[in-house]
Image: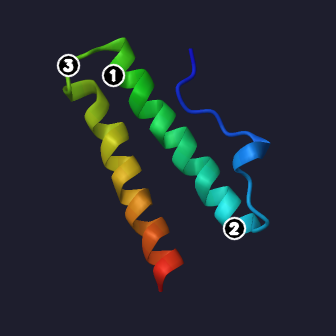
Amino acid sequence: MAYFEWNSQVELDHPLLNAHHKRLFALAEAVAQSVADSPEARPAEPALRELIAFAREHVHLVVV
């Protein structure tokens, strides 16, 4: 079961933002799958850290 799936309904008319958003969806999906596979926090930590790091990079790029 997929929790976060990219689709054309969330696409913007901006290729770079679409690429970033696709990656955010993929990273969020990795976190969700890790949690679904093992409810303990430890297995999800690496995926969550990667998601947080990329989200910060994305927001910084958009705001600056």
Q: Residue 15 placed where, x, y %? A: 76, 65
Task: Indicate which disc, 2 or 3, sits on the residue closer to the N terminus.
Answer: 2
Amino acid type, residue under disc 1 in the picture: Val
| The N terminus - image quarter | top right
Q: In the image shown, does 63 or 50 lie closer to the viewer?
A: 63
Residue appearing at x 20%, y 19% in the figure: 40
Front-lying residue, 16 or 43: 16
Residue bearing mark 3: 40
Along the viewing direction, whichever of 43 and 14 lies nearer the viewer:
14
Q: Is residue 19 left or right of residue 37?
A: right
Q: Amino acid at mark 2?
A: Leu
- Within 10 Å of disc 1 (Cα), the crowding (few <14, some 14-19, many 20+) is some
In this image, 19 relative to 59: left or right?
Answer: right
SS under mark 3: loop
Residue 17 sits in quarter = bottom right
Percent from the top left, x then y, of residue 21? 60, 54
- Quarter of the view holding residue 42: top left
Question: Residue 51 appears at what percent x and percent y?
Answer: 40, 48
Q: Residues within 10 Å of mark 3 (few under 14, many from 20)?
A: few
Q: Which element type, helix, strand or loop, lies under badge 1?
A: helix
**Mark 2 highlights which residue?**
16
Q: Report the residue at 48% width, 41% height from top.
A: 27
**What residue is shown with label 1?**
35
Ranked by sequence position, the earlier of labels 1 and 3 is 1
